[in-house]
Image (cartoon, grey):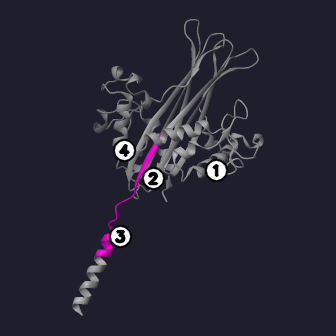
Amino acid sequence: MKKLLVLVVVGLLALTGLTGCAAPKTYKFGTGSYTSVSGRAATAEAAGRVQVTSVYAAVLLDDAGKIVYVDVDAAQNQGTFDAMGAVVAAEAAPTKTEKAGDYGMKGNSAIGKEWFEQMAALEAYMVGKTIEEIKAIPVEEKDASHTAVPTGEDLKTSVSISIEGYVAAVEAAVKNAVEVKGVAKVGVGSVASVSGRAATADAAGRIQTNVTFMGVAMDKDGKVLVSLLDVAQNQGTFDAMGAVVAANAAPTKKEKGADYGMKGASAIGKEWFEQAAGLEAYLVGKTAAEVEAIEIDGEGVPVAEDLKTSISVGIDEYLAAFAKAVANAVEVK
């Protein structure tokens, strides 16, 4: 009887060991973006405009490369100027998802759906698919502003917007994905700023947008496993007659790498991508409350000794993007 009891206990312990010590699932988590810039000259009747649309995406992939989670948003910002090269307005706007029903697409949509509703349908469609399958979605050109509208029966009743830029952002996120284990929640968020400079006889005017976006993966205790930071910095220029000089999209700060050109002017001799990597590494293992408690000075620069040697740039917008990512985080199922 004792022998039987021992065998039962040993069997239960073995079973517990097999189930309780199972290795956490391995995923890949990434973020990416796609930006377009357009310009319109000023006239006596209407202000000129530089508009920047920075689409960013976050993805979680399983070991087969299939999407488990995807979040796509678009930060569309603009600045205006008059026919004398003076800036009229340069203010950041909420993202398209944040605008929700206020974005105002529903009334002009062929399917009667707002942007956020169409994006939710597109995201749901992407789940369970590889990036190759997503890139193979059949599309058609309807007009100059709708160049890649889905034509398949499974999407055309829920998505009438052009998806080219959204797919490009997801593809970039997949390409940038890094391995993560034990993930319980993932999210992405952004913060935008817009600035303007008037044109003079000697220098072009400028509208510049900065879209800081951050993706975060957390464990069951709310501690950061991975944080991914980048900034889409773009601009359009115009002359003192209100004519557009240039309006072209640029690589992100991380994509520019050493070409961003910060190292020579940095007090610590580090490029932007190196400083971003320092912050990303610093956040690992911290909770949202601990990140929120990071002390910064009036310029947004960290004051802690363990950060001063790796980061000399202002991080206030980066921390704000992190907070939004945490607020937007969803459970991994």
User: What's the CA distance linking mark 2 and mark 1?
Assistant: 23 Å
Q: Which of label 2 and label 1 is nearer to you?
A: 2
Measured from the top left, where is residue 223 in percent x and y? 38, 52
Q: Which of label 1 and label 4 is nearer to you?
A: 1
Measured from the top left, where is residue 16 in percent x and y? 32, 74
Q: Amino acid at mark 2?
A: Ala
Q: Amino acid at mark 1?
A: Ala
Q: Which of label 4 and label 2 is nearer to you?
A: 2
Q: Which region shows up in magenta?
A: 14-31
- At mark 4, the secondary structure is helix
User: What's the CA distance linking mark 1 and mark 3?
Assistant: 36 Å
Q: What residue is drawn where x is 43% and y is 40%?
A: 176
The residue pinned by badge 2 equals 64
Q: What residue is drawn where x is 57% and y is 41%?
A: 135
Task: Please give the label number shown on residue 305.
Answer: none
Q: Are marks 1 and 3 in contact (CB under 8 Å)?
A: no
Sequence order check, earlier mark of 1 and 3: 3
Sequence order check, earlier mark of 2 and 1: 2
Residue 323 is one of the magenta-drawn residues: no
